[in-house]
Image: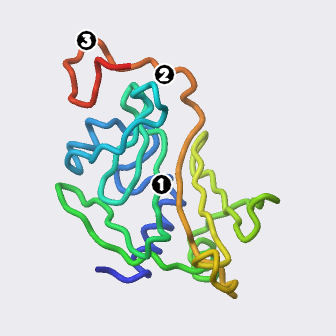
Amino acid sequence: MTDSTDFLARLTEFVATGSLGELRYGATLPELAARYGDPWDGGRIHRKKRWPHAFGFGDVLTVFCRCRQLRSVSLPTWQGELELPLSGDGLQTYRTRVVESELTTALLAAGCTWQTVTYENLPGQRTLEFSPAEDVWVALILTDREDRNDPQLADWMLYKAMMWGYDHVDCPGPDPALPDDGWGAAEL
């Protein structure tokens, strides 16, 4: 297992580029499966429709559209460690406990800029939002405590990292000329 410094470097790259290795907005499910191995099936996003659909690579949670393009990535850093996929068919475990002062120092050193977003209905939480590319967003969600019953932290901690985009309103669906890809091409 690597330490949180290694994870902080991967996270900074994620924020700066909008990608985590080949896991980037618009990547296709078949190309990612060829690179990282078959994903595990995370289930439907909507009760009555197969797509969009959740899949996972290690602890990386992803959502793909009906046309098999990656629409979002989520890293549940609150778990304290994550298994991130390596090229081929392997995983690397990272310690993910990162506090805000470490995070902002690394992000500023990398030349990243962000907007801080807070919500009245979510006290004890704030989000740092980044736009590494047109129509692509990365959010780092920070919380003021590890557990809701714990005392408030002096240095807030990273709770979750997310990436998504908005440019894919009308999905063309999978190419009907291609054979079934094994992920439900024939299903709605």
First in residue order: circle 2 vs circle 1: 1
| Residue that numbered label 2 is attached to | 171
First in residue order: circle 2 vs circle 3: 2
Picture quadrant of residue 170: top right
- The alpha-carbon separation of the residues under discs 2 and 3 comes to 16 Å
Outermost residue, right direction?
A: 120
Q: Amino acid at mark 2?
A: Cys
Q: Amino acid at mark 1?
A: Ser
Q: Amino acid at mark 3?
A: Ala
Question: In the shown orientation, is residue 44 left or right of residue 88?
Answer: right
- The alpha-carbon separation of the residues under discs 2 and 1 comes to 21 Å
Question: In the shown orientation, is residue 176 left or right of residue 159?
Answer: left
Which percent across, then down, holds residue 167?
58, 31
Which percent across, then down, holds residue 109?
59, 75
The C terminus appears in which quarter of the rendering? Answer: top left
Judge the density around disc 3: few (<14), some (14-19), many (≥20) Cα neighbours within 10 Å.
few
| Residue that numbered label 1 is attached to | 74
Q: Nearer the viewer, residue 142 or 15?
A: 142
Which element type, helix, strand or loop, lies under badge 2? loop
Q: Residue at x 51, y 67 (%)?
A: 12
First in residue order: circle 3 vs circle 1: 1
Picture quadrant of residue 54: top left
Which percent across, then down, holds residue 168?
54, 29
Judge the density around disc 2: few (<14), some (14-19), many (≥20) Cα neighbours within 10 Å.
few
The dot on residue 177 is: 3
Q: Residue at x 25, y 11 (%)?
A: 177
